Image: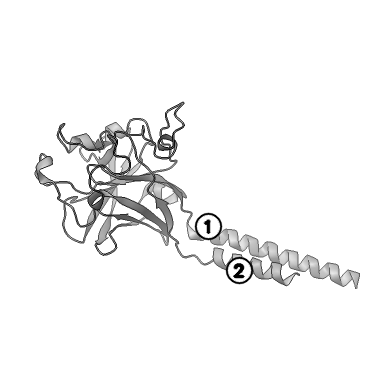
Amino acid sequence: MNKRYFSSGLFLLSALCGGSARAVPLLDTYIGARDYGYGDVIGRKDLFDIASADVRRGNGKLDVDIFTNFVGNVGVYPSVTPNGKGIGYGDLLLGGKWNPFVKAGDNSADNLIGHKFDDASNGTTWRYGLSFDNRWSSANSGTFTLYELTGTNQQDLLLTDSFFGSNVTVRRGQAVAVNRDATNFVHALDTGTWSIDPALKKLSFDLSLANAGELGTWEYLSLHWGMLCNNDVIEGGVSVPEPGSLALFGLGLGGLLARRARQRHTTRTRIT
């Protein structure tokens, strides 16, 4: 057997069978509807900008890291919220297929990449929500509840409009939180933990998939996250297969390589 071919096959097999969860990056290219001409970030980038997210799935867990300037700034602008608590964390919303809205006939980059006409009424239907138990916490860690969402976005989620008066400039119509009062459409499945790293400007979600329903079987995830005002939003889809499934593929590849090696050896024996 050709040594280079065999060595390359072994390297690929080793990589596939490693079994460790690798982060899948998602860059923030999403704008969404009602940006009032600001583009990606409404208002102060030093407060609201979201750079990217990393998604990892492995060992029966789902981990999502979001890199955003909003880390450490919970509670800003208390006067613009009816409860006086200021702007808090939005919930992490998850779905299967990412299905953003693109306006027919508009081939601008902002429409095709930023999805500037996309909001909760005409985009992806979210099926799970990681909902903060205290979205205004100033601590470095806390808990969330995982909810399965069985209605439309309007039935099981709260939009930005629910948290701000009509005279405040926020990205309207975006889904930001699980509506825990919509008991016909939201069903608690499990709990998990969130944490922040102020130095890295990182917000992290850590969830066991043992009691996560269909979410635990999905190998493709769509996600949506923003602070309550959604003055910046990250949304998109990523492929995150369980490392164990890659290992099974790797074992199959290993068998194929071994068979190929035996065939080549037999051929050479017959020729000589």
Around disc 2, counting alpha carbons within 10 Å, would you say few (fewer than 14), some (14 to 19), or many (20 or more)? few
The answer to whether 179 is drawn above or below residue 240 in the figure is above
Q: Is residue 76 above or below residue 165?
A: below
- Write the residue at 40% across / 51% down: 27
Q: Nearer the viewer, residue 205 or 82?
A: 82
Coloration of the structure image: one colour
Q: Which residue is at the far front?
A: 37
- Which quarter of the figure has residue 122? top left
Q: Where does the image place residue 166, in percent across and percent down from the top left? A: 16, 31
Q: Residue 198 versus residue 203: which sits nearer the camera?
A: 198
Q: Is residue 93 visible?
A: no
Q: Which mark is residue 83?
A: none
According to the picture, the residue beneath numbered tag 2 turns out to be 11
Residue closer to the observer: 132 or 27: 27
| Vertical position of residue 245 compared to residue 228: above or below | below
At label 2, the amino acid type is Phe
Q: How many marks?
A: 2
Q: Which element is circle 1 on?
A: helix
Rendered position, 101 above or below 207 = above
Residue for badge 1: 245
Percent from the top left, x then y, of residue 272?
Answer: 90, 73
Q: CB of mark 1 within 8 Å of CB of mark 2? A: no
- Where is residue 3 drawn, in percent x and y? 72, 72
Name the quadrant containing residue 246: bottom right
